[in-house]
Image (cartoon, coloured by chain):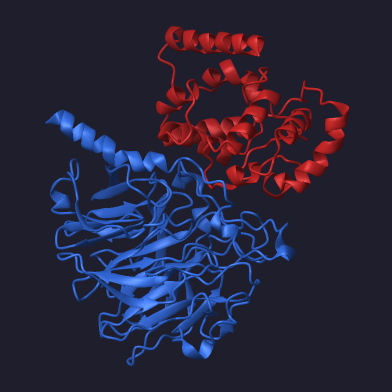
Chain colours: A blue, B red
């Protein structure tokens, strides 16, 4: 029995090692680079894969509005990506380049970090609902039922849906995962490269019934989303999207999108049209922007909006109720860097969004330096007491923002 | 090849003896690394890379990849297996602060002349920096050991050497075996100042 389990474990681990044979073609982020930019030294920033200790970071440069406080909540979680909250207060943390899922248990001022899942295939997406932790790998969505009762031995997962990455996409293969008010799991399937013609199902937002495994398309023409949330007041689906690279320092914008939960499937234009009104230099000739749905908000070029959350906790002042908070991972494909912060967006009674304003800043040190920042926000989680966690994959640190006292 | 391999075995044995004879040494003791990588991380063995003056993030990322199995090496994998993330960071910080010695390797005159052109043509300086001193997770290759650079470039081209972002594997595809020789000889003799 034990041997069988070992064999199964070995078989499951095999694909993760198989991917270690590197591909000969250029990494997908080089795609769409015009000849004039061939010698550009712009490059994505690699995270510190061993993490960095919070005590070694310039935490005193972080800024939040008056009355708020920010501190390092836990460190030592290399490449901390998405966040999820268990019913018993367990904070789950995912990886993108690495292969683990972690659990953080708050023991009254001291945090214990456990590696609960290992050897997964880019397990970027996680969400907790009714006792179950759902994990989105690049090709599958898994469910670990009753997870908080067995953190030391979560057992084998059940598969919600498989074959989401049949071509082993070169780029944007990581998934974000969110639980909708309709009980369905929402996730992205990114475009397989910077600017390429997507195949069926790629460049979309999808949802799946976690009990039946049936799929529906929510939105198309979405280059890559790494953040999905729902307006608690009217159930609108909101998601972030990254515009294409190598088309200029200021175009196109990264965008925020809004789709009613019951809606025909909007198409936001990728790869033909960006930000609702910019024809793509390569693909723009095939379709006009006039054919496509428009984003709710332009967020800035290359600013890289990732996780977003509606705030409905008890701790922040009343004016913050139902505001959207967005983690900006920060630009790399831009001469003068921007982002590397958490922005706040107010949503009015009609559900429309206002201009973003900075909420957590200070990671960006020198907008012309390489690297320009010392940390990069990825995802946001509101704890039961109304305080807010922000993950940072560059350092493997999670910060906590509180108000008052 | 016989001689360096022997030396390699000898230094490995030295490291091994150090391991078993030393009092419960911490796995993160830089002296353990020095047995093969040389005093202060300045390697005296053409097959073993120098760690001195390498960017800290490059060293910690390399150790991480050995421990996690992305990179495999009969000597490095077992060494990295014992190290925690914090210990990897400690070693990375230590060796990044050591000064690189002037290279003992003397490049052939024609390779020293052809090197800078090749380094530009094949985008080496685009990521490794104008002086090829490395940055962030990208190593210093100026003054790196000849046989080591040769072996890495060949392995990148053969798609058997994992790199964290796929850049080197793709960059090495365009290199001919002869260009790999020229680059390795040029880089090994290049000062890291």
Residue B184 point in image, percent of width and height: 72, 31
The tally of labels here is 0
Q: Residue at x 47, y 49 (%)?
A: A395
User: Toward which corner of the image does residue A10 lie, by quadrant?
Assistant: top left
Pick whichever, B174 or A327, lies toward us: B174
Check the picture and name the quadrant holding the N terminus of chain B.
top right
Does residue A395 lie above or below B145 as drawn?
A: below
Q: Residue at x 31, y 39 (%)?
A: A13
The residue sitting at 45% across, 81% down in the picture is A268
Looking at the image, residue A196 lies above or below residue A181 = above
Foreground of the two, B115 or B32: B115
- Return the x and y of residue A19 as percentages of the image width and height: 42, 44
Position of residue B2 in the picture relative to residue B87 (left or right): right
Taking the spot 33% from the left edge, 66% from the top edge, the residue there is A405
Judge from the rendering whether residue A116 lies leftward or rightward of residue B97; answer left or right: left
In depth, the one of A39 and A146 nearer the eye is A39
Q: Quadrant of the C terminus of chain B?
A: top right
Residue A163 is situated, as x and y percent measured from the top left of the image, at: 31, 58
Q: Residue B152 sits in which quadrant?
A: top right
> Does the image show residue B129?
no
């Amino acid at each position: 029995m034990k041997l069988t389990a070992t064999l199964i474990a070995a078989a499951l681990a095999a694909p993760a090692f198989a991917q270690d044979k590197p591909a000969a073609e250029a990494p997908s982020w080089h795609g769409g680079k015009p000849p004039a930019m061939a010698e550009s030294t712009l490059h994505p920033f690699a995270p510190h894969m061993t993490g960095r200790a919070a005590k070694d970071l310039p935490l005193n440069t972080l800024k939040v509005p008056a009355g708020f406080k920010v501190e390092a909540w836990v460190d030592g979680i290399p490449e901390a990506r998405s966040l999820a909250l268990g019913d018993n207060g367990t904070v789950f943390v995912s990886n993108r380049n690495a292969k683990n899922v972690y659990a953080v248990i708050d023991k009254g001022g001291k945090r214990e970090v456990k590696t609960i899942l290992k050897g997964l295939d880019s397990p970027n997406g996680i969400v907790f609902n009714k006792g179950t932790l759902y994990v989105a790998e690049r090709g599958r969505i898994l469910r670990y039922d009753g997870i908080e009762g067995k953190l030391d031995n979560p057992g084998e997962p059940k598969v919600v849906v498989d074959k989401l990455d049949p071509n082993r996409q070169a780029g944007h293969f990581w998934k974000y995962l969110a639980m909708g008010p309709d009980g369905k799991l929402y996730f992205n399937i990114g475009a397989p490269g910077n600017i390429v013609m997507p195949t069926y199902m790629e460049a979309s937002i999808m949802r799946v019934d976690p009990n039946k495994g049936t799929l529906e398309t929510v939105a198309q023409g979405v280059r890559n989303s790494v953040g999905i949330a729902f307006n608690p007041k009217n159930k609108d689906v909101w998601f972030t999207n990254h515009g294409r690279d190598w088309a200029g320092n200021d175009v196109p914008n990264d965008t925020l999108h809004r789709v009613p939960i019951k809606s025909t499937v909007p198409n936001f234009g990728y790869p033909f049209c960006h930000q609702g009104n910019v024809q793509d230099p390569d693909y723009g000739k095939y379709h006009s922007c006039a054919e496509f749905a428009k984003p709710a908000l332009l967020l800035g070029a290359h600013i890289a909006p990732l996780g977003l959350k509606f705030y409905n906790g008890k701790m922040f002042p009343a004016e913050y109720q139902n505001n959207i908070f967005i983690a900006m991972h920060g630009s790399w494909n831009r001469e003068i860097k921007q982002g590397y912060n958490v922005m706040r967006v107010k949503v009015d009674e009609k559900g429309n969004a206002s201009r973003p304003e900075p909420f957590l800043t200070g990671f960006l040190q020198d907008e012309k330096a390489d690297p320009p920042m010392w940390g990069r926000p990825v995802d946001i989680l509101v704890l039961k007491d109304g305080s807010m966690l922000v993950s940072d994959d560059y350092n493997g640190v999670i910060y906590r923002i509180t108000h008052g006292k | 090849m016989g001689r360096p391999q022997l030396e390699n075995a000898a230094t490995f044995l030295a490291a091994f003896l150090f391991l078993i004879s030393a009092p419960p040494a911490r796995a993160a003791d830089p002296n353990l690394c020095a047995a093969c990588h040389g005093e202060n991380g300045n390697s005296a063995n053409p097959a073993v890379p120098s760690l001195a003056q390498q960017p800290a993030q490059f060293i910690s990322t390399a150790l991480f990849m050995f421990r996690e199995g992305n990179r495999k090496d009969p000597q490095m994998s077992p060494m990295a297996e014992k190290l925690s993330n914090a210990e990897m960071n400690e070693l990375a910080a230590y060796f990044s602060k050591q000064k690189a010695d002037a290279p003992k390797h003397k490049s052939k005159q024609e390779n020293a002349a052809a090197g800078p052109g090749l380094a530009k043509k094949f985008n080496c300086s685009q990521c490794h920096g104008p002086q090829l001193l490395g940055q962030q997770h990208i190593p210093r290759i100026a003054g790196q050991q000849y046989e080591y650079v040769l072996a890495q470039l060949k392995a990148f081209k053969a798609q058997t050497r994992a790199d964290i972002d796929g850049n080197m594997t793709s960059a090495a595809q365009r290199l001919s075996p002869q260009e790999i020789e020229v680059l390795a000889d040029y880089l090994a003799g290049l000062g890291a100042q």
